[in-house]
Amino acid sequence: MGKSMWRDRAGTLFACQKTPAQGSKGMVVTNHPLGSAAGMEMLAAGGNAVDAAVAAQFALTVVEPMMVGLIGGTTCHIRRADGSHVIVDGMSAVPLAGTPDMFRPVAGAPPEVFDVEGRENQVGPKAVAAPGSLLAWCHALRRYGTLSLADVMQPAIRHAMRGFTVTPYLSDCIDSAAADLAKDRLAAARLLPGGLPIKAGARLVQADYGEALTLIARDGEGALHGGPLGALLAECMEKAGAALSLRDLTEYRVAERAPIRGRYRGWEIVGPPPPAASGVHITQMLNILEGYDIAGMGFGTVETLHLMAEVLKIAFADRAQASGDPDFVDVPVERIVSRQYADERRAAIDPGRAQAWTPGLLAKEGADTTHLTAADDAGNVVTTTQTINSLFGARFVVPGLGMVPNDYMSNFDPRPGRALSIAPGKRVTTSMSPVMALREGRVAYALGLPGGRKIFPSAWQALVNLIDHGMSLQEAVEAPRIWTEGPMLEVEHGFPEDVREGLRRLGHKVQVMPTVAGGMNGIQFHDDGGMTGAACWRADGSPVALAGGLARAGVRFVLPG
C-alpha cells in the first residue's frame, strides 16, 4: 500500500505533530534534543553508532532524570556492520539477599497487581533492585564501540555541571511525582525549589551528579560497582534496611543473548529474548494477525481495534503465566512463537464479542531457580531502551551520588511460587522492545519506546502501521495507540467517539487516555543509503541527522598569488 493510501480505508485519521530528519552519514534519535546532540557529537568526531548510543544514554541520565539512570536497567539491541545481531542484557535483578516473602502483599489484590503494604516495592530504598545499566553501557562501548569512556561521557558531565534548560515535559513529570519527591530532602531541594516543581525554562544544575560522572569517566564502571560510589550506595541501602548490598554491585554480570526472530508477511522481525517479554510476544501477536487482512480492515476501525485488543489480551494472559528470567523459569519460547499455537489462539477469537482470556500454556520453575536509536553509515545500528522503571524510579536521591535509583522490585510478584516471584539474582521481566524489521536481510526500520508494560504492545502497533497500513515512519510513531490486558481497554484520545462507541458495543470497557506508553522514536533505512529519523509527540523526542561529508580527495584550498 502506498504511503498515505492507508487513509482511504481508515476509521481514524490524525495529523503528525513533528517532522522527521533526513541524513546519509548518521542518525541519532532520542527523547531529548540534548541526548540526540550528545550522540551526534560522537558521530561527528568519527565514532560509530555504539559510541553515539552510549554518549546519548549518559546524557539522558542528566536531562531525563525521571526516566533513566545509572542505577537502572537496560536492554540494548545492536546490529553490527557484518549483519549480526546481539542483545546486551543489563536488566536489574533481585538483590542476593532478597527472599520470596520480603514484602507483604496488599490483601485481596488481583493476581496481576503487585502492590505491597507501605508501597515498599515502589518508593524508597527497599524498592531498589541490583542495577545493570552502567555495566551494560560500558560493556557495549568496550566491545563494539571505538571511543573511550571519558570521551563519550563528556556531554553528560557538561550538562550536569553547567545545567540545562528544563522543558515543560520534565516540569510536568516532576509535578506528577511531587508528593513522593517532597518526602526526600535531596530530591525536594533539586526538583521542588520552594516546594513547587522547577519551572519550564529554569536551569537545572546537578553538580553532585556531575562529580560522580567525572569519577566514573576517570575510573570506569568500577567506581559504582565496587568503588567509592558503590560504597555510598550500599551505605544508603543498609541504613534503610534494604536488601541491596555492595556484593550485588560487584557480582552483577552483563549477559549477551541471541535475539528472537519472527516472520510477518515477508518481513523478519528481530527483538530481545527472555527475560524480555517483548520479542516473544510481538512475534506471537504478529503470528495471530497474519491470518487477517489488516490492511483491508483499515487503521483505527472498530473491526481492527477489536481484533488487536483481543490479541493483546491473549499475549498478556500468556505473559503472566510463562514469562521470566530463563535462568529461573523454563519459558516455552518455541511453543509461544509457533504458527500452530497462533492458529489455536486465533480460532478462539470472536469477531463480534470481547472476551476474557486465560493462559494457553504453562511455565515451569527452574531447578536452580526512556529509548534511543542510532545508526552510522558503516551499517552499525543500535536501538536500546533503558530505565529506572517508574517515573523517578524509587523517588529519592542517593546521598553523595546525586542519582535517582530504580524501583524494579515492584515488577516482581510479592507472592511466592509464581513465575514472576522474587528469587535472589533473578532478573526482572521487561516489556522493553528495541526491535528491528528486516527486508531481504537488510534492516529497514529500528525503533522502540519507554512505557512499562505498554511498551511491546505499542512497538507491535507501530510495526503493523508500517507493514500493513503502509504508513510513513513519522506517521507510525505518532499514530494513536490502544492497550489492554483486560478488563479495561485504554484508547488514546486520537480515536474518535464513534469508534470508541463501536468498541463498547462489542463489550469492551473503554477508558480514554491522554497517552498510551511513552515517546517512540526510530530510524528508517532507505535503499539508496539514506536514513529518516522520527520521534513522536509523547516526549521531547528529537532526531538529529548527519549528511554531507569530508572534502573530495585531492582538493586543496589555494589563494591566488
Image: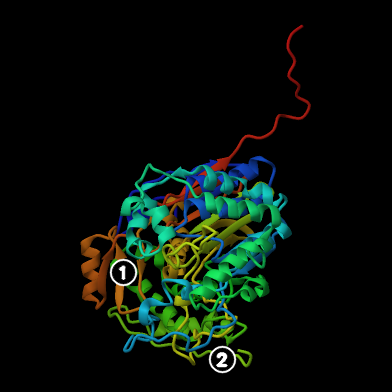
Q: Position of residue 342 (x, y in %)?
A: 48, 81
* Mark found first going from the N terminus, 2 or 1: 2
User: Nearer the observer, disc 2 or disc 1?
Assistant: 2
Circle 1 packing at 10 Å, graded few (<14), some (14-19), many (20+), is many
| Residue 490 numbered tag | 1
Q: Report, in whole angstroms, how far the alpha carbon at label 2 lies from the one at label 1.
A: 32 Å
Q: Is residue 518 visible?
A: no
Q: Position of residue 16 (x, y in %)?
A: 37, 48
**Decide: marks 2, 1 in contact (CB < 8 A)?**
no
Location of residue 138 by image quarter: bottom right
Q: Is residue 152 left or right of residue 336?
A: right
Q: Position of residue 363 (x, y in %)?
A: 53, 89
Q: Is residue 61 above or below residue 347?
A: above
Q: Amino acid at mark 1?
A: Glu
Location of residue 72 by image quarter: bottom right
Q: Amino acid at mark 2?
A: Glu
Furthest-right residue in this view? 554
